Image: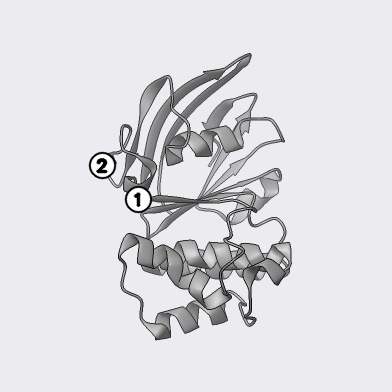
Amino acid sequence: MIEASIRKKQGDFSLSAELSDGGFICLAGRNGSGKSTLFRVIAGQLKMDEGFVKVGGRDVTRQPVERRGIVMVTPGSSLPHLKVDSHLKWGAAIRGVPLDERVIAGTKAALGIDFGGSVRTLSLGMRERVSLATALLARPKVILVDEAFSNLHDREEFVANYRKLAGEAGVDVMFSTQDEDEGAGADHLYLIKQGVAERAK
């Protein structure tokens, strides 16, 4: 469950958002509407002016990034110097989460990761698959997916499988998109326009 009341001003831009939901959540809005800013505030990368962020009922407003139980994935999140399998284990190792090889193999199969080698040699879509799987295997409370579903081949199948795996693991996922229609398959939909986020479903 993500609960947040956020106010943030950056120059002429003002962000205002109220959130209280769990499951698979879509945040839809045009470029420049404030999606990434909102995610960065929730993740703790950007300090809000006023408000709070709670994860699973725990107030993390003043917690550093690494103690919030939140992982944020962007198209540039991958670590290019790692091999694919090492990358998949990296997040879990950092968080001290034990990993069963069968879980890794099942996640790879479900998310279409049937390739190996150095991450730097992969296409953008393949790198995003690896980053998203790495986040899921780390078992945080929340994964924020900032436009990182957008460059995937077989996107609908991937998102459906990702949603299933996240649900089984008890991980809430909030993803951003420019296309409001992509919220149809989400548990909840928030629309953001000119910095104001409102629940639509």
| Residue 30 x %, y % | 71, 35
Question: Residue 40: where, in percent of width, then height?
Answer: 51, 37
- Seen in the image, is 3 located left or right of residue 108? left
> Which numbered tag is attached to residue 104?
none
Q: Horizontally, is 148 left or right of 58 in the view?
A: right
| Number of other residues with Cα within 10 Å of mark 2, as a class: few under 14, some 14 to 19, many 20 or more | few
Indicate the secondary structure of the residue bearing disc 1.
loop
Residue lying at 44% horizontally and 72% vertically, measured from the top left: 89
Q: Nearer the viewer, residue 111 or 79?
A: 79
Q: Which residue, given by chain and number where applicable, does mark 2 sit on?
A: 58
Q: Residue at x 64, y 57 (%)?
A: 149
Whether residue 24 is visible, yes or no, is no
Q: Which residue is mark 1?
A: 69
Location of residue 49 (image quadrant): top left
Instruction: Choose mark 1 or mark 2, whichever is in front.
Output: 1
- Kind of residue indicated by mark 2: Arg
Counting from the top left corner in percent of width and height, residue 168 is at 39, 69
> In the displayed structure, would residue 142 be above or below residue 54?
below
Say whether marks 1 and 2 touch (CB < 8 Å): yes
Q: Amino acid at mark 1?
A: Gly
Report the side of 145 relative to 67 (left or right).
right
How far apart marks 1 and 2 lie (CA) works out to 10 Å
- Label 2: element kind: strand
Residue 120 point in image, percent of width and height: 67, 66
Is the residue 149 above or below the residue 90 in the image? above
Up/down of 54 relative to 67, above or below: above
N-term mark: 1 or 2:
2
At label 1, counting other C-alpha atoms closer than 10 Å, the crowd grade (few under 14, some 14-19, many 20 or more) is many
